[in-house]
Image (cartoon, rainbow, N blue to C red):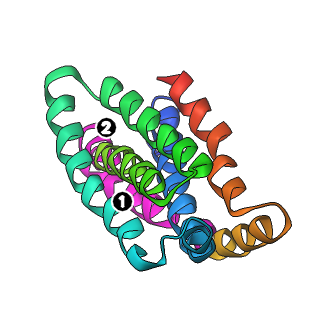
Protein backbone atom coordinates (compact mmCIF):
# COMPACT_ATOMS: atom_id res chain seq x y z
CA UNK A 1 0.00 0.00 0.00
CA UNK A 2 1.64 3.19 -1.09
CA UNK A 3 -0.87 6.04 -1.36
CA UNK A 4 -3.86 7.46 0.44
CA UNK A 5 -6.06 5.96 -2.30
CA UNK A 6 -4.30 2.57 -2.36
CA UNK A 7 -6.70 -0.37 -2.20
CA UNK A 8 -6.24 -0.90 1.54
CA UNK A 9 -6.87 2.75 2.42
CA UNK A 10 -9.34 3.89 -0.23
CA UNK A 11 -12.47 3.41 1.92
CA UNK A 12 -10.91 5.15 4.89
CA UNK A 13 -9.75 8.08 2.77
CA UNK A 14 -13.14 8.48 1.09
CA UNK A 15 -14.93 8.17 4.43
CA UNK A 16 -12.81 10.92 5.95
CA UNK A 17 -13.36 13.21 2.96
CA UNK A 18 -17.13 12.57 2.82
CA UNK A 19 -17.51 13.19 6.55
CA UNK A 20 -15.55 16.43 6.51
CA UNK A 21 -17.18 17.75 3.34
CA UNK A 22 -20.69 17.01 4.67
CA UNK A 23 -20.00 18.94 7.86
CA UNK A 24 -18.36 21.74 5.89
CA UNK A 25 -21.31 21.99 3.52
CA UNK A 26 -23.76 22.08 6.40
CA UNK A 27 -21.76 24.72 8.27
CA UNK A 28 -21.39 27.03 5.30
CA UNK A 29 -24.92 26.51 3.99
CA UNK A 30 -26.48 27.17 7.40
CA UNK A 31 -24.58 30.42 7.79
CA UNK A 32 -26.28 31.57 4.59
CA UNK A 33 -29.87 30.70 5.54
CA UNK A 34 -29.75 31.26 9.28
CA UNK A 35 -31.00 34.87 9.20
CA UNK A 36 -34.12 33.74 7.35
CA UNK A 37 -34.70 30.85 9.77
CA UNK A 38 -34.23 33.13 12.77
CA UNK A 39 -36.67 35.68 11.38
CA UNK A 40 -39.30 33.06 10.55
CA UNK A 41 -39.00 31.30 13.92
CA UNK A 42 -38.86 34.57 15.90
CA UNK A 43 -35.30 33.91 17.03
CA UNK A 44 -33.51 37.12 16.09
CA UNK A 45 -33.12 38.06 19.76
CA UNK A 46 -31.01 34.96 20.40
CA UNK A 47 -29.57 34.59 16.91
CA UNK A 48 -26.03 33.92 18.15
CA UNK A 49 -27.17 30.81 20.00
CA UNK A 50 -27.69 29.03 16.70
CA UNK A 51 -23.91 29.11 16.23
CA UNK A 52 -23.03 28.77 19.91
CA UNK A 53 -25.22 25.69 20.40
CA UNK A 54 -23.48 24.00 17.48
CA UNK A 55 -19.95 24.95 18.59
CA UNK A 56 -20.37 24.13 22.28
CA UNK A 57 -21.99 20.79 21.53
CA UNK A 58 -19.26 20.00 18.99
CA UNK A 59 -16.64 20.28 21.73
CA UNK A 60 -18.55 17.80 23.88
CA UNK A 61 -19.11 15.53 20.88
CA UNK A 62 -15.41 15.51 20.02
CA UNK A 63 -14.41 14.55 23.55
CA UNK A 64 -17.11 11.90 23.87
CA UNK A 65 -16.28 10.35 20.48
CA UNK A 66 -12.58 10.18 21.29
CA UNK A 67 -13.25 8.52 24.64
CA UNK A 68 -15.72 6.05 23.14
CA UNK A 69 -13.39 5.26 20.24
CA UNK A 70 -10.63 4.40 22.72
CA UNK A 71 -12.93 1.92 24.46
CA UNK A 72 -15.07 0.52 21.62
CA UNK A 73 -13.27 1.46 18.41
CA UNK A 74 -14.28 4.16 15.93
CA UNK A 75 -17.28 2.43 14.33
CA UNK A 76 -19.78 3.01 17.12
CA UNK A 77 -18.97 6.70 17.69
CA UNK A 78 -19.04 7.28 13.93
CA UNK A 79 -22.52 5.77 13.70
CA UNK A 80 -23.68 7.82 16.68
CA UNK A 81 -22.08 10.95 15.22
CA UNK A 82 -23.82 10.57 11.88
CA UNK A 83 -27.07 9.61 13.61
CA UNK A 84 -27.11 12.68 15.85
CA UNK A 85 -25.96 14.95 13.06
CA UNK A 86 -28.84 13.66 10.90
CA UNK A 87 -31.36 13.89 13.74
CA UNK A 88 -30.29 17.48 14.27
CA UNK A 89 -30.79 18.26 10.59
CA UNK A 90 -34.32 16.84 10.75
CA UNK A 91 -35.16 18.65 13.96
CA UNK A 92 -33.83 22.00 12.74
CA UNK A 93 -35.39 21.57 9.31
CA UNK A 94 -38.83 20.81 10.75
CA UNK A 95 -38.65 23.04 13.84
CA UNK A 96 -41.89 24.88 14.57
CA UNK A 97 -40.17 27.16 17.11
CA UNK A 98 -36.74 28.67 17.77
CA UNK A 99 -35.92 26.66 20.93
CA UNK A 100 -36.51 23.41 19.03
CA UNK A 101 -34.37 24.72 16.20
CA UNK A 102 -31.57 25.45 18.70
CA UNK A 103 -31.82 21.94 20.11
CA UNK A 104 -31.48 20.60 16.55
CA UNK A 105 -28.38 22.75 16.09
CA UNK A 106 -26.92 21.31 19.30
CA UNK A 107 -27.52 17.76 18.04
CA UNK A 108 -25.83 18.67 14.76
CA UNK A 109 -22.92 20.10 16.68
CA UNK A 110 -22.49 17.03 18.87
CA UNK A 111 -22.55 14.76 15.83
CA UNK A 112 -20.33 17.04 13.76
CA UNK A 113 -17.77 17.38 16.53
CA UNK A 114 -17.69 13.63 16.96
CA UNK A 115 -17.14 13.08 13.24
CA UNK A 116 -14.38 15.64 12.93
CA UNK A 117 -12.58 14.20 15.95
CA UNK A 118 -12.90 10.72 14.45
CA UNK A 119 -11.46 11.99 11.17
CA UNK A 120 -8.36 13.15 13.05
CA UNK A 121 -8.22 9.84 14.90
CA UNK A 122 -8.47 7.95 11.60
CA UNK A 123 -5.58 9.97 10.21
CA UNK A 124 -3.45 9.24 13.27
CA UNK A 125 -4.23 5.53 13.34
CA UNK A 126 -4.76 4.72 9.67
CA UNK A 127 -1.84 6.33 7.88
CA UNK A 128 1.90 6.03 8.29
CA UNK A 129 3.94 9.17 8.94
CA UNK A 130 4.91 9.42 5.27
CA UNK A 131 1.24 9.78 4.17
CA UNK A 132 -0.16 11.97 6.94
CA UNK A 133 0.66 15.26 5.22
CA UNK A 134 -1.19 14.10 2.09
CA UNK A 135 -4.31 12.97 3.91
CA UNK A 136 -4.35 16.11 6.05
CA UNK A 137 -4.14 18.20 2.88
CA UNK A 138 -7.09 16.26 1.45
CA UNK A 139 -8.98 16.71 4.70
CA UNK A 140 -8.41 20.47 4.54
CA UNK A 141 -9.42 20.58 0.89
CA UNK A 142 -12.69 18.84 1.77
CA UNK A 143 -13.77 22.32 2.89
CA UNK A 144 -12.85 23.97 -0.40
CA UNK A 145 -15.73 22.97 -2.66
CA UNK A 146 -18.35 23.46 0.07
CA UNK A 147 -16.89 26.93 0.68
CA UNK A 148 -17.19 27.81 -2.99
CA UNK A 149 -20.61 26.36 -3.78
CA UNK A 150 -22.34 25.88 -0.41
CA UNK A 151 -23.47 29.46 0.21
CA UNK A 152 -24.59 29.98 -3.40
CA UNK A 153 -26.56 26.73 -3.54
CA UNK A 154 -28.03 27.26 -0.07
CA UNK A 155 -29.16 30.75 -1.02
CA UNK A 156 -30.82 29.49 -4.18
CA UNK A 157 -32.50 26.57 -2.40
CA UNK A 158 -33.78 28.90 0.32
CA UNK A 159 -35.08 31.37 -2.24
CA UNK A 160 -36.69 28.79 -4.54
CA UNK A 161 -37.90 26.27 -1.97
CA UNK A 162 -37.29 27.12 1.69
CA UNK A 163 -34.51 27.50 4.23
CA UNK A 164 -35.78 24.21 5.68
CA UNK A 165 -34.82 22.40 2.47
CA UNK A 166 -31.18 23.35 3.10
CA UNK A 167 -31.19 21.29 6.30
CA UNK A 168 -33.30 18.45 4.98
CA UNK A 169 -31.41 18.30 1.67
CA UNK A 170 -28.31 16.94 3.39
CA UNK A 171 -30.18 13.96 4.85
CA UNK A 172 -29.62 11.50 1.99
CA UNK A 173 -25.85 11.93 2.28
CA UNK A 174 -25.95 11.53 6.06
CA UNK A 175 -28.29 8.54 5.90
CA UNK A 176 -25.95 6.80 3.48
CA UNK A 177 -23.14 7.15 6.01
CA UNK A 178 -25.34 5.97 8.91
CA UNK A 179 -26.21 2.84 6.95
CA UNK A 180 -22.54 2.28 6.19
CA UNK A 181 -21.72 2.12 9.92
Image quadrant assignment for residue 146: bottom right
Position of 133 with respect to 11 (left or right) is left
Residue visible at 61% across and 75% down in the picture: 32
Inspect this view and state whether residue 5 appears: no
The image's mark for residue 54 is 1
Say left or right for 71 vs 50.
Answer: left
Marking on residue 119:
none
Single out the mark in the foreground, 1 or 2: 1
On-image quarter of the N terminus = top left
Q: Is residue 141 magenta?
A: yes
Task: Identify whether 81 is placed above or below 130.
Answer: above
Q: Earlier in the sequence, mark 1 or mark 2?
A: 1
Per the model, the C-alpha gap separating discs 1 and 2 is 28 Å
Dots 1, 2 in contact, CB < 8 A = no
- Count of residue discs: 2
Q: Main secondary structure of the magenta part?
A: helix
Q: Position of residue 86 (x, y in %)?
A: 52, 39
User: Does residue 84 appear left or right of residue 130 in this picture?
Assistant: right
Task: Write the start and end of the magenta stretch as one range.
Answer: 119-147
Q: Position of residue 115 (x, y in %)?
A: 37, 44
Q: Which element is circle 2 on?
A: helix
Amino acid sequence: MTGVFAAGRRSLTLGIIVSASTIALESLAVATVLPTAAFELDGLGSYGWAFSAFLLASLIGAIAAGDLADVRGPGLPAGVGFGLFGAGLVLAGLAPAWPIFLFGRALQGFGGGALLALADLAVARGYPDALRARILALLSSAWLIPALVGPVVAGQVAELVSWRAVFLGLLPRVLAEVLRH
